[in-house]
Image: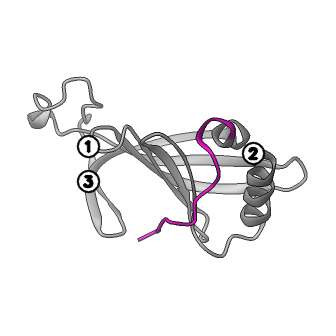
Amino acid sequence: MVDASKQFFLTEIKNLKQPISLHIATDGITFCPNGKFREVTAAGIGEVVLGTWRYDSSVNKVFMHSHSKSCIKPEDSSIDPEGNICKPGYKICKDGSSEFECEEVDSEYELNWEDLIDRGGPPSRYTSCN
């Protein structure tokens, strides 16, 4: 099942026409056909990261470039003191129909998608980029 899941992900990501996501528990990454992604960690209380992704077929690797990360307004920090408190100059990010406070980030990394499938199971089509 795992090998089939990996092959399915590779086949889809090479020419993505519909959103696809990878999950481990409440954490997930949704890949959108327009080259954007949305990563949610610790859904509901955690972070949302927005950015772009690209697939390099010569090495079968997915590279992620994070552009913005959600944060908690300083006046709301008593709600979740462990969260990422916004630094001065934060902005409002829009992702589909949702809006949230966020900060600009500039981080590029290789996504270990095989490990995500090993630990979290097969990719899901039951996702949206709206």
- What percent of the width, then of the height, locates residue 102? 31, 47
Type of amino acid under label 3: Phe
Residue at (78, 57) in percent of width and height: 10
Cα separation, mark 2 vs mark 3, equals 35 Å
Residue 60 on image: x %, y %: 84, 49
Q: Residue furthest front?
A: 1
Residue 129 inside the magenta-drawn segment: yes
Name the magenta segment's main secondary structure.
loop
Note whether 54 is above or below 107 in the view shown.
below
Q: Mark 3 vs mark 1: which is more N-terminal?
A: 1
Q: Position of residue 34 (x, y in %)?
A: 59, 71
Q: Which mark is residue 103?
A: none
Report the magenta residues as a range: 118-130
Which element is circle 1 on? loop
Where is mark 2, residue-wise? Answer: 2
Image quarter of residue 55? bottom right
Q: Residue 45 appears in which quarter of the rendering? A: top left
Three-letter amino acid code of the residue under disc 2: Val
Q: Residue at x 62, y 45 (%)?
A: 121
Query: Could you say which disc has been placed on residue 100 in the image?
Result: 3
